[in-house]
Amino acid sequence: MLYVAFSGPERNTFDTPRSGWPQPAVVDTVIEDLDRLMEEAGIDAVLMYGNAFTTPDVFWLTGFRSSDEVIVLRNRGEDTVVAAGFNTLERVRKESTVRRTFDTSEIMLQLIAENKRLMDDPAAVFGSVLKELFSGDVIGVPTHLPAHILVALQDLGYKVKVVPYLLTEARATKSPREVEMIRKAGRATIGAVQHVIDLIAETTVGPNKVLLRDGQPLTVGDIKSALDHFLLDRRAETAEDTIVAVGRLGFDWHYLGSPDDRLHAEVPIIIDVFPRLKLERYVADVTRTVVRGSVPPELRRMFDAVSEAHSAAADALSEGALMDEVNMACYDTLRRYGFDSTRLNPRAEEGMTHSLGHGIGLFVHELPTFYRYSDRLERGHVLAVEPGVYLRQVGGVRIENDYVVSGRRAERLTSGLDDVQFV
Ligand SMILES: [Mn+2]
């Protein structure tokens, strides 16, 4: 027997989360964006399957931080429903923002009796869920919906539309709670970067300008370990990897840094850290370029250009501004210093050869993007701004901070550490 459980206020506990649980991130104002986008996309519901860790959209819409796979259905203009077995639903009611649940235990027991699991017969489970909960015409699914579930929906006769940008568009504008979590991630990140810059500042310069700590060469592996330990103590972890690129190796801005690379004096050392808070799941993204010892004139000019380009771009981050106005604030500044960019010269091989930045949130790269030139900045957009200049014979200089668009001027979320680091 299937039933729909409406967890009313008399029986739920999620308005008073247990101490220690982070408050769920999403608030109603952000959900309104999703309903509007669903209407524009011509879909009556959005359907997802996954867990918080593999499918951040599921976490965003439910606030349920678990490795349990759940079915998430949201009819346009209605409460989000989570469908799962009763064990999972008990935790959904305690630990998520979801107020409406659907118990799939009976249908799962029938499958288990046939020695099957959900993925062996997705039509059985999704058919039951949709029959009870969906009365519209078109179901929208994100690209991360497993392909055999998509086929099962079509076999069941539902009209399905793939909506690749729906959730990412909806997530682009952050609620105040989400901004606070990114700010918290930013504090941990700034602290971590400061910590390893202090390590670099404490080195002595040995033969061939190798930086020494206790008489031993300081390596990229040492720096990454120090970053990881610092972040773990603040309940954050490196989201993918950290970039530590020494000297000319930094010319290739894809280069992550090998553990055996040695740090040297008088060359740029790019440190780009983008950790995720383990509980809250939000990221920050910070880059500093450090030089130990004297700074050659050409390298100093790169710092001057990038630092000024960063400020010019940050000043241009205002509500309603075109993305390309922000781009041009950066690239025009670099040009005045004599540096090329792929925006002004698509064939450029030196200068600034990557994008100005990207949205951040549950992912290190998400919307908005500076590549959509005619899009406009909106209140609540959170962006990492990371101008850089790269010369083959020198390496790279990059400065990155995170900002929330909140009116005429954006607010910086990663403060407390100077942009230019000569130590
Ligand atoms: Mn970045």
Image: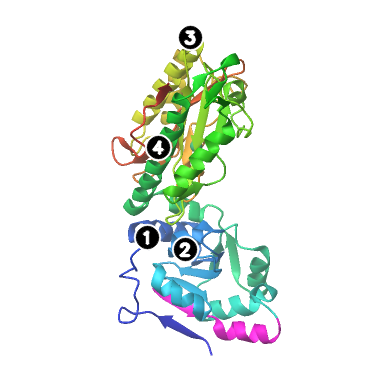
Which region of the structure is painted magenta? 99-115
Residue 95, position in %: x, y?
A: 41, 69
Residue 360 visible here = no
* Residue at x 50%, y 10% (from the top left corner): 296
Mark 3 or mark 4, which has the lower sequence index?
A: 4
Q: Could you say which disc has been placed on residue 297 in the image?
A: 3
The amino acid type found where label 4 is placed reads: Ile
Residue occupied by mark 4: 190
Tell me if the residue at label 2 has its CB under 8 Å from ligand 1: no
Mark 2 or mark 4, which has the lower sequence index?
A: 2
Q: Is 266 on the left or on the right of 123, as rendered? A: left
Secondary element under disc 1, as helix, strand or loop, is: loop
Image quarter of the N terminus: bottom right
Residue occupied by mark 2: 65
The amino acid type found where label 3 is placed reads: Pro
Q: Image height check: is 288 above or below 349?
A: below
